Amino acid sequence: MNNFVFQNPTKLIMGAGMIARLSKEIPHDAKVLITFGGGSVKKNGVYKQVIDALQGYEYYEFWGIESNPTVETLREAIALGKEKNVDFVLAVGGGSVLDGSKLISAAILSDKDAWDLVLDGHRISETLPLGTVLTLPATGSEMNNGAVISRKDTAEKYGFYSNYPKFSILDPEVTFTLPTYQIACGIADTFVHVVEQYLTTPGQSRVMDRWAEGILLTLIEIAPQIKANQKDYKLMSDFMLSATMALNGFISMGVTQDWATHMIGHEITALVGLTHGHTLAIILPGTMQVLRDQKADKLVQYAERVWDIHHGTIDQRIDKAIQKTEDFFRSLGLTTRLSEEKIGMDIIEEIKKRFEQRKAAFGEQENVTGDVAYEILKTVV
Ligand code: NZQ
Ligand code: ZN
């Protein structure tokens, strides 16, 4: 096990009706900027629950944070927050609203342009306090300090690190209205978050391995049941908690991490707009295939413990595990090939070029360069 320091300060508040607790969590004299996406929260009653809970508060609403939040939109929210002198940010929505609000809560206190904050490369430690009401299980943004921001005019998408939310409210009932496609992408995203922290170096931590495998097995168990009945409170609770636990640091203590699949996925989203979780469902089987020698021991463990594959040569077991992974994503209703999404060689070439320009070297062995990304993408054409 590698040395590590672990601290996750986010207060997790989970369960039906818990949005009403907002008034316990936000100081009554706070000036609150509430941030929203495109309006789903008006249709499913989340907006009303939030506003009811904030009666008597001074608050301002900002609407229109889009999927893959753009710095162009966020600058407007930052300007509103500065103008109104807010001192608390409350994000109500999916990962995009939460991520965008992490940038907003940092940029309101800064003189720098928001895009410069994203590119800066340092963890931002001075931010307004941020609370969240999560409506889409997927990103883990509700309990981590990461955010991914896009820039429209250059078709770029990069992550940055900031402060953790002070609290996050997770009411599984609010997920009942999610479109089937968003659920599929959310399950795929959660699955790949675990794999990015698990399918790396063997023998680093039994505890981390089994926590990771526990989340994967949970997802595999609940996915078909959710497909049959997405308004099942118990199923959606398990999905929501799985997504949070997959990317809040609890499964990455003392182990190496990969993240190459994510880095390639961000480029695809930036270039063609494909939804984040869907890009991962396409790329992950390619990453497993191209890096199968490097990841062989862990792939065999994954085959055995997650997919119950115990027989055959090592190569045959790895082949089966990769096939099972792709089949799982297809069972969610997602396509798993670039050609099915009309993504061609021009995009693959462009990603290779971008990685080369950035001197990219991703993955646990820092060997996923432009060339390797090209190989991975060619595998899943
Ligand atoms: O905008 P509204 O109208 O609210 O609709 C949203 C949006 O269209 C809708 N939605 C959300 N909750 C709903 C709902 N519709 C009905 N009922 C509900 N309860 O779903 C659509 C997608 O929302 P979005 O927030 O974009 O999805 P997601 O949560 O998957 O977030 C994706 C973003 O998070 C980043 C991704 O790159 C992407 O930009 N990620 C953030 C991470 C992090 N902070 O740690 C890690 C991830 O790997 C990921 O990169
Ligand atoms: Zn992700």
Image (tube, rainbow, N blue to C red):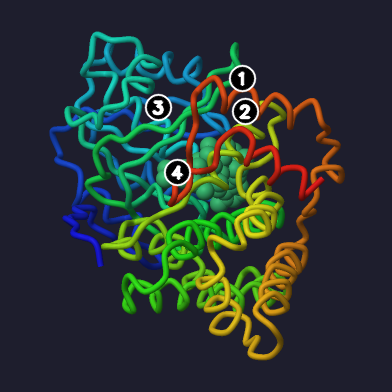
User: Residue 61 bears which disc, if any?
Assistant: 3
* Mark in front: 2 vs 4: 4
Is 67 or 339 nearer to us in this picture? 339
Q: Quadrant of the C terminus?
A: top right
1 or 3: tag closer to the N-terminus? 3
Q: Earlier in the sequence, mark 3 or mark 2?
A: 3
Residue at mark 2: 270
**Is ligand 1 less than 8 Å from the beta carbon at label 2?**
no
| Residue 44 appearing in the image | no
- Residue type for callout 4: Glu
Question: Which image quarter is the N terminus in?
Answer: bottom left
The residue to which callout 1 is attached is: 155
Badge nearest the viewer, 3 or 2: 2
Residue at 54% in and 19% down: 357
Q: Which residue is mark 4?
A: 366
Quarter of the image for residue 100 reads top left
Mark sitting earlier along the chain (1/4): 1
Q: Position of residue 129 (x, y in %)?
A: 21, 36
- Judge left or right: residue 81 versus residue 274: left
For the residue labelled by badge 3, is the local secondary structure a helix, a strand or a loop? strand
Q: Which sits earlier in the primary sequence, circle 1 or circle 2?
A: 1
- Local SS, label 4: loop
The residue sitting at 60% across, 23% down in the picture is 354
Query: Number of labelled discs?
Result: 4
